[in-house]
Amino acid sequence: MERTYSVYILASRSRSLYTGVTSDLERRILEHRQGVIPGFTTRYRVFRLVHFELFGHIHDAIAREKEIKGWRREKKIHLIEQRNPTWEDLAAQLPHIYKNQNLQSVSLTRSSDPDERIRDDN
């Protein structure tokens, strides 16, 4: 099976954003949520997966991560809201996405309790 690389954006309830890249998105999300790697995401509780994109080559994923990290906050918010306007947590969809890999940009939404949704109005 071909290796898949992911660029992802996490959000917190306090409206902080974190962009990262990984070769195992499910594992990395768990690490963020369990505080395995101390730092920004643990300190600011940035655990909600609000956007991700899949790539077949690490160089493409790293280039995209750097591109997104260079954007102003407003542009990141626009990217998220194009496919996930309610800022729902997409982590539950990961097993399904990886099972049916399609190495195009992927960012999906799911319906859930509106009280669990977050918005960033800045």
Image: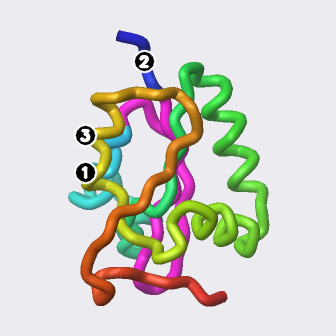
Nearest-to-viewer mark from 1 and 2: 2
- Residue visible at 77% across and 56% down? 70
Which three-letter amino acid code belongs to the residue tagged 1?
A: Leu
The residue at which mark 1 appears reads as 30
Write the start and end of the magenta stretch as one range: 5-24
Q: Secondary structure at mark 2?
A: loop
- The furthest residue to the front: 111
Give the numbered dot on residue 3: 2
Which three-letter amino acid code belongs to the residue tagged 3?
A: Pro
Label whose residue precedes the other's in the sequence (2 or 3): 2
Give the numbered dot on residue 19: none
Residue count near mark 2 (Cα–Cα under 10 Å), binned few <14, some 14–19, many ≥20? few
**Real-space Cα distance between discs 2 and 3?**
15 Å
The residue at which mark 3 appears reads as 95
Which three-letter amino acid code belongs to the residue tagged 2?
A: Arg
Q: Position of residue 68 (x, y in %)?
A: 70, 53
**Real-space Cα distance between discs 3 and 1?**
13 Å
